Structure formats: structure tokens, C-alpha cells
Image: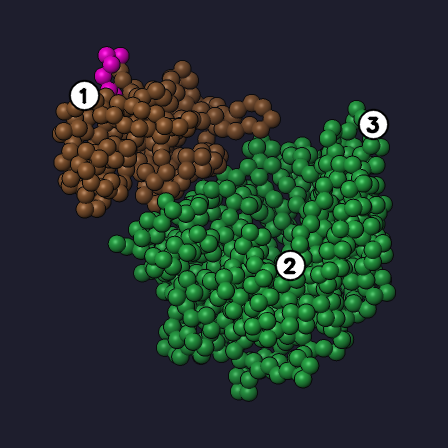
Amino acid sequence: MSLSDRIEKLFMSVQKPVRYMGGEFNAVMKDPAKVDVRYAFLFPDTYEVGMSHLGMKILYHSINARDDAWCERVFSPWVDMADLMRQNDIPLFSLESRTPIKKFDLLGITLQYEMSFTNILEALDLAGIPLRREDRTEGPFVICGGPCAFNPEPLAPFVDLVALGDGEEETQQTIDLYKKWKAAGLPREAYLKMAAEIPGIYVPSLYDVSYNADGTIESMTPKPGSGAPEVVRKAMVKNLDDAAYPEKLIVPYGEIVHNRIMLEIFRGCTRGCRFCQAGMIYRPVRERNIDRLMEMADKLVSSTGYDEISLMSLSSGDYSCLPELAHRMVEKFAARRVRIALPSQRIDNVLTDTLKETQKVKKTALTLAPEAGTQRLRDVINKGVTEDDLIRSVTDAFDQGWSAVKLYFMLGLPTETDEDVLGIADLAEKVRRCYFSIPKERRAPGLRITVSASVFVPKNDTPFQWAAQLDYENVVRRQQLLKQALNRIKGVDFKYHAPDVSYIEAVFARGDRRLGEAMERAWRMGCRFDGWSDQFRYDLWLKAFEETGVDPDFYATRQRPADEVFPWDHLDCGVTKAYLRSEWEKAMRAECTRDCRKGCTGCGMKRYEGACV
Amino acid sequence: MRALIRFGKQPRLRFISHLDLQRFFQRAVNRTGLPIAYTQGFNPHPVMSFGSALALGWTSEYEIIDIKLSAPMGRKRTEDAVRAALPEDLPVLEVRMVDDKHPAPMALVQMSDYRVRLEGDTSGAVIAQIPAFMAKADVPAVKKTKSGEKEINARPLVIAMEPLPDGFSARLMLTERESIKPDLLVALLAEMAGVATPECRIHRTMLLGTDAEGQPKPLMEL
């Protein structure tokens, strides 16, 4: 029986067989005999999550634009499927051709979230690929990219290459190099050494790490004679208008998380919020021009049949010609019944005109992220938003028929006090009053205020990379404090989670190579899909740390001294450590830094040719 | 004007549920570029309907979707546009343009033809029971419905059944009140033979209604 038939035998026994089926409209099929390089792209989460991810779509279609390579998709099989695959001896396979992953030349993995790391080990194991890179003598080279690639050290024992920064060009270069390497018939290590010369490619095996007596890192240096650079600079696409962007998107059969056209209007963010890793690592800001966006949208609507377009970016309200873009989009697509959705609107930038435009096609809950409850703490995190901004946005929205508001906050930010936490409830109460300030006949009925408070996780490559995560007991105490305060306000729904996941996330966000063993142990004990609350096993994680001699507090709740060497110091994300340190010091003084659209703040990005011009 | 489109469902896509397929077609018709008629109301969607739902795991060469157009359109242009909007595993097999008064395909369906392929050691014994089954007047069976289990006489629901080397072909009733699925038929034959029910692959070859004389006729020709 063929592998394909054996796979299908399992479909009647699993939830959502559509996850493993392939054959969607616009999925790319090629003749394997006619390509030189087979590239498997793994998104280490479910199909529904992975298929909603823009980066994967961009790379999938840009690799497949080449005649000499075929990129196929792989997602983490849900636990029911993974168990059945093991019982039936079915290896991890690609969706398009159902080829075992082990037979591919390159395996690209996107690191979107620390809590998907065990899924990578699970995938390698299901594929029959040895977990540790030194044990591999054949099979695909394992390449990781995505935001977490800026601190890939916990994964260092398992990956061959790490791709830093924008993937559009460096991915192509790893493929070109693979062809060259294969044609030359060189040994496996030669590919790694040559790859270290590609801009943005970091090869963990070419570096030595030494530690101080207190467990901190003394240095990370290239192995003598390896030729690897002391500091690896990220890859950067200079002009997004010229960068690859798919004209077709795969249209799934089942429902996925974001089932719509995603149009990336710009990359990067100039705000400089001090907790935000994306705001640092995706610099500089590069906008696409309106004509190019209109052309992209037109092609995508025709090729997919979707009836909704999301304008994607880190802060869409900052797009320099947003009113014009929104207006042209709404005007052009209204007749084709296509809705335009603006995600994560910034409270200081929701333009009344824009609201009107989007409202014409769709009315959803107004989502605002003040992040902190008091002005002092918002200044600490450099969230350049005042209470007045918030009140104005909310009042405008209520006046124009909105009745649902979602407010996002973080608990445990550096310098946070109980007063800051209670400030969140205070803000919710003020939002409620805004609604009742609108005459009854003008406002939409049914006020709903949702307050969500996540637990702050200090991340590498941010000004808060020196910060301690708030300890477990205090997180729980402050959650309860806020809960009681919000209970006194009518019509407010409070959402929060146990701090367990955020704690493990904090360990890995700033982890080093020594965590690889703990991760492997946790996976062997059964940890996978750690980002899914029904799968997450805090007890197993703590056990894994204990058994491998790791103190998780060392990574999560320890404040770092100014001169500490970090596990990611040899990886250049564009923003310098000196700048991040100065931002940290300003944070401690509750001093703001301006949006760099209003003048350069000297983050270090200008060291890159073609940036910030 | 409406377009009746007959399409196939190839093995690869046999695990798409009917609900997912309906959602899929909402986007597929948008891709055709044809003048599609939309429902009125707050959340308009294309006016379309299906012939008969296909169970999960079955394949077919006789699925029908009925799409309403807001302007006249030629048959060939419609066919080309729909073909370009569907993946190769949902091949367009036949297109017919009808006027708005034509009855909905769903209302015309009375029976369906299937080809059933049996797998496993007990297949031969099951196939051998076909003449005995057809010779009976009553075959009591328990049919699972949404509201529970129902006792039925399966025999009159089977209009015809012919053995094949690896299974059988059958014409079965398919109306709201009277219907039987091929997998139930396989289970009944296995029970008669006193053997375990073999695994089966079910493929729909045709949907039929009846003409003015009451004779069976393919749905696309009615």
C-alpha cells in the first residue's frame, strides 16, 4: 500500500482530516523529477494556525516562483494524528505530495513563539530525523527563521542554520547555495560553513560558548578557523515594493484562524514601545506604496475569492497615507462585496474619517491596547498614549455606533505597583462613562467592555531584556486585585490566565544553549503543543528543569546587571545593545522617547545600508 | 438564469465535509468572475444550492451545484470560468444553463447510482449474497437517523444491484423519506453471509430523477 493510502486510512479516525489532506485551491504541485531542490516548510503548530500566517505564504509562493525548487507545507499533526502516525509507522509527510520529510533537501521552520519549540522536536522525531544536529549524516538541513530566531540558542543543539531578519532573499540564497553544494559533492559540514557567508545566516555549530562561575555567559565566539563572523547581521529587504509578494494564496477548505486576504502594508514600527520585540527586530519601517497595494489586493481578490482583506502591519494606523488607502480600498471593493478590516487600531491614531470608511463595510469590536493602567507606567514602557487619547477614541467610536470595546493590558511590567494595576480598573470605569455620555438615542445598545490582562514576558532584543519577570505569587495576587476592582464595575468582562505558560515562555525567550537538554527532556516526558492550554503540562516542565539541573528562575525572574553578556549578543537585530540600554535607563526614569518618524533616535538601524532613507 | 454544474470529487478530497464544501464554493464562485446573484439582506451571499450531500469519505462523478446568475451568460464561458475556479480534484464534468423556473436539483433527486469496492478477505462472500438479497421481499434493517434508530425494510430501497469482480454497483432510493446508504447495504450482505463487514470505498456515479412517464433519468437531463 502506498504511503498516501496509509495516511488516508487514518483520516476516518482523526479530528479534522482536512488538516492533513492538501489539494487546496492554489496549492502548488510540481513534478519532483523536474526540480533540483525540495524544500519543506514546517509551521510548528496546527494547520489552522499555520495557514493563517503571512510569512509562510510569502515564502511558500516566492520559493515556488522558481522552476528549480518546490516548496511544500508541513504542519504539526495534532496529538491524535501524531499518535496514530507512530502506531502505524507513518513518517511526517508534506501536504502537497505526501513525501516523507526526511527525503527533502531543506527543512525550513518558522519560530513564531517559544511555546512551539517542543513541536519542532516532535516533528523531527515523527520525520525520523535525529534530533541533535551532530547525529545527522543525511536528510534535510534544518533551518529556523522568524522572530524567535533572534534568540535561537535553546534550539542550537537541534538546528543547522538560523535565518535572521527578512526571509525573502536569504531563503533563496540558502537554496542557491544548496544547489552549488550538491553539484560540488562536498561533505555536509561544507554546506554549513558556506552558508555562514550568506547575509543573515547564523550557524550555531560554528560557535563556542564559555560560561562564568555564576552561570552567566563569558563569551560566544566563532570556532577558530570556521570563518564564521563574530557578529551575524540580520538580512534586510530594502524596498518592499520590489520584494516578493504572492499573487495567489492557498484557499483552505476548512475554517482557519484568519481566513481572509492579508495585505502587508508596511514592515517595522517606529513607536519604540519598550516591551515590544517586534517593534525592535522588524526595523526599519518600510511602506508599500498605495498603487502597489491596490494592485496586490486586486490580484488576490480575483485569485482567491475571499470577501475580506486585512491590512497587516505592526501598527496600521501609522501608515502614512492611511485615510487615502482606506478610502480607495473601500471604494474599489465595495461593489465586489469585499470588506476591509483594520486590525489592532492604535488608540492615538484612529482617525474619525477612517472609522467611517471601515464602518461602512463592517462593524466589529473596537480593540485598544493601552497596555498599562497609569500614565507613569505607560511612560515607562514608552507607550506614547495618554488617557485623553483613549477617551477621545472611545467617545468617537461610541458616538458612531460602536458598543463593544476590548482593552488589552499587561501585568508585571517593570516598576509596576498595585496603584498601576488599580489604574486599569479606573480606566475601564472611565470608558464605561464615555458610553453613557452619548445620548441614548445616538448610541448603539448593549455596552460590552472586555479587559484582557496578559502576563508580561521580558524578551531579548528589547529595552526590557535586563528585566526580571514578576514572580508567580505576585502575578496571581495582582490578578486577583484587578479582578476584585473590575467586579465592582457593571458590564466589564475580565480575561486573564494562570502565569504558568508565561513563566516557561520567559525562560526560553532569554534562554541559552544549556536549555536544549531541558527542552528535550520535557518533550520526552510528553510536552508538545505547549501554547495550547489543554495540552500544556506545567508539572512536566518543572520536572524537566529539575532533572536536567536547570534553575528556571535564573532565566525568568532574575534582573540582569548592565554588563551581562547575553546569549544573543552575537546576533545583530539592527538595534544596538547600547541603544537598548539607554532606553532601559530612560524607562527607569519614566522618560519617553519620541516616535522616530519625528526624528531619528539613533537605534543603530542606520548602520544597515539602505535603511531609514 | 442559473447554471447547473456537474462536478466530480476525487479521492484526495473525499474527507471534505459537505459544510466545508459549501463554504469553499462561496469563495469559488467569487473567483469565477461571473455575474453571480446574491441574497438580499445584511450579510449577502451567493444564491446557490447543491444536488445532494455526499457523505464523508465518498468520491463522486455526479455532484451538482446550482448557481444563480444575475445576467445571461453563455454555457461555454460559464464552464470555462467555473473550471478555472476549482482545483483539479473537483473537476467540472458538465454544465447546463437553465431558466429560473427550472426546479432545484435537490427537489428532483430520487435515486443515486453507486459503485462500491470492497476490501478484505470477506469481500467474496459478501458479493455472493447479492442474488439472494435481490430475491427477497423483505430485508429488515436498522437505520441510524438524526433522531435515533429506525427499523426499515431495506429491500424496496434497492432498485438494482449487480455484482462486480471487486464489489458491486447499485441503484438506491434517495429521497427525503426513503433512502439507504451503500455502507448499510454492505453490512446487510455481510450479515446474510455471516462474515465480518469488509471495508468499502463508495463512489457515486449518477444522481437520477424521473421523467414524465416515471422512468429514471439522469438529473442533468431532466
Asked whether residue B217 is drawn in magenta, I would say yes
Asked whether residue A9 is drawn in magenta, I would say no
Dot 1 corresponds to which residue? B137
Please say if the residues under marks 2 and 1 sit with CB atoms less than 8 Å apart.
no
Q: Which mark is residue A439?
A: 3
Q: Residues within 10 Å of mark 2 (few under 14, many from 20)?
A: some
Q: Secondary structure at mark 3?
A: loop
Which chain wears brown? B
Q: Give the residue furthest to the bottom.
A: A224
User: Picture coordinates of residue A198 (x, y %)?
Assistant: 53, 72
The answer to whether B34 is drawn above or below residue A254 in the figure is above
- Say left or right for A504 vs A246: right
Q: Quadrant of the C terminus of chain A?
A: bottom right
- Label 3 and label 2: CA atoms lie apart by 44 Å
Q: Is residue A593 visible?
A: no
Q: Identify the residue at horizontal 74%, vertical 67% (top origin).
A: A467
Q: Identify the residue at horizontal 55%, vertical 45% (top origin).
A: A257
Q: How is the image coloured?
A: by chain
User: Picture coordinates of residue A559 (x, y %)?
Assistant: 75, 71
Are the numbered discs 3 and 2 placed on the same chain, yes or no? Answer: yes
Dot 2 corresponds to which residue? A500
Tell me the subunit letter for badge 1.
B
Which chain wears green? A
User: Picture coordinates of residue A31 (x, y %)?
Assistant: 33, 56
Give the image quarter of residue B110.
top left
- Kind of residue indicated by mark 1: Ala
- Residues drawn in magenta: B212-220
- Label 3 and label 1: CA atoms lie apart by 75 Å
